Image (cartoon, rainbow, N blue to C red):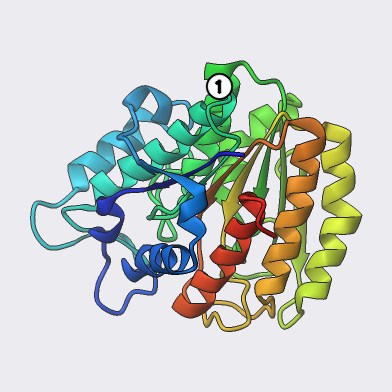
Amino acid sequence: MTVAYFTHPSSAQHEMGSHHPECPDRVRVINDHLRANGLLDFMREETAPVATREVIMRAHSAELLDALEEISPQHGYAGIDGDTTMNPHTMSAVLHAVGAAVRAVDLVCTGEVQRAFCNIRPPGHHAERNRAMGFCFLNSAAIAVLHALEAHGLQRVALVDFDVHHGNGSEDILVEECNAGRVLMVSTFQHHLYPGTGDRPMADNMVNVPLTAYTKGDAMRAAVTDRWLPALHEFKPELIVISAGFDAHRDDDLASLGWVEADYRWLTQQLVAVANLYSNGCIVSTLEGGYSLGALARSVGEHVKVLIGAD
C-alpha cells in the first residue's frame, strides 16, 4: 500500500498573530512527530501544488475568491473576522492547502496511491461558498469532494468530519450534492460550540451527531457505531474524504470533549474498514483543527498509523 503525505512551506508562513491558537507550529509538530517515529518512511512525500481557480470555483463564488485576493496584505495583517486574519503569506498557504487536497484526490482516484494525508493549514471546513470565517478561507475538503465527482466521475463520495466544531461550510457547499445522493456527509461535533450550527442538517444525506460537552470517547464511539456506520454501509462510498480535526482531545482548550489518542485510532480503523469494503481502501484525509500541540501530534500519529496499515 502506498500512502501520500502532502505538505508545503507556506503552511508554516501563514500566521494570525503570536497568540493565535491556529499557529504555524501545528504543521511543524505533526511533521516532526511523524518523522521521529519513522512513519514518514512508509509514506510518499509530496509537495502541495497551487490549486487552480477552476477547481476552487466548484465550491466557492468568484466574489469570495476575488475578495480574498484583494484583501490579502502586502505587509502586516488584514482582518476577515474577529478570529480570522490574513498576512502576506496567507493566500499562498490557502492555495497550496487546496492544491494538496485536490492532488491527493487525483493520486488516489487514478490508483497511483491508495490513501493520502494532507498536513496543511489553514483549515477549511468553516469556509462557506460565499464567506471565509472561523480560521478558514477556502474549504479544501469540500473542494476535494467536488473534484472527485466532477474530474474523476465518481458517483458516491463520503465526507467524514470529526472536528470538534461543526463543519458549517462543508454543509453549505455540499447541500445540493447531498440532496442529489452523490455525497454523504457524516459528522460529530460539540453541541452549541462555535459556530453554533449543525443540530438540524441542511440536507437529507447528512448525519450530524452533536455531542454533549464533557463527554468522552465512548459517546463518539456510540455515535459512529449507531449513526455513522449504518449510513456509510448503505451509501457504499467510492471514496472517503476526511476533515480530520483533532480538537476534541481532552487536552485541547478550545473545546470540552474528552477524546484521547486511542479514540482517534479506533475511529480511523472504522473508516478504513468501510473504505476497504467499498472503495479499495481509498481515503483522502486533510487536517482541520487541533490546538494542543502535543496532543495534536500524537493523535495525528495514531491516525496516520492506521492509514498506512501499521496499526
Q: Nearer the viewer, residue 204 or 19?
A: 19
**Residue 114 position by quadrant:** top right
Q: Nearer the viewer, residue 82 or 206?
A: 206
In the image: residue 86, left or right of residue 1: left
Residue 261 in picture, x, y percent from top left: 65, 73
- Quadrant of the drawing holding the N terminus: top right
Is residue 176 depicted above or below 209 in this figure?
above
The residue depicted at 26 percent of the width and 34 percent of the height is 66
Q: Determine whether the residue tagged by mark 1 lies in a helix, strand or loop.
A: loop
Residue 56 in picture, x, y percent from top left: 40, 31
The residue depicted at 91 percent of the width and 56 percent of the height is 226
The residue depicted at 72 percent of the width and 28 percent of the height is 238
Is residue 18 depicted above or below 160 in this figure?
below
In the image: residue 93, left or right of residue 158: left
Q: Nearer the viewer, residue 149 or 7?
A: 7
Classify 10 Å Cα crowding around label 1: few (below 14), some (14-19), many (20 and above): few
Q: Is residue 204 visible?
A: no
In this figure, which residue is indicated by the disc labeled 1? Answer: 110
Q: Amino acid at mark 1?
A: Thr
- Quadrant of the drawing holding the C terminus: bottom right
Residue 247 in picture, x, y percent from top left: 56, 70
**Residue 80 position by quadrant:** bottom left
Is residue 300 depicted above or below 298 in this figure?
above
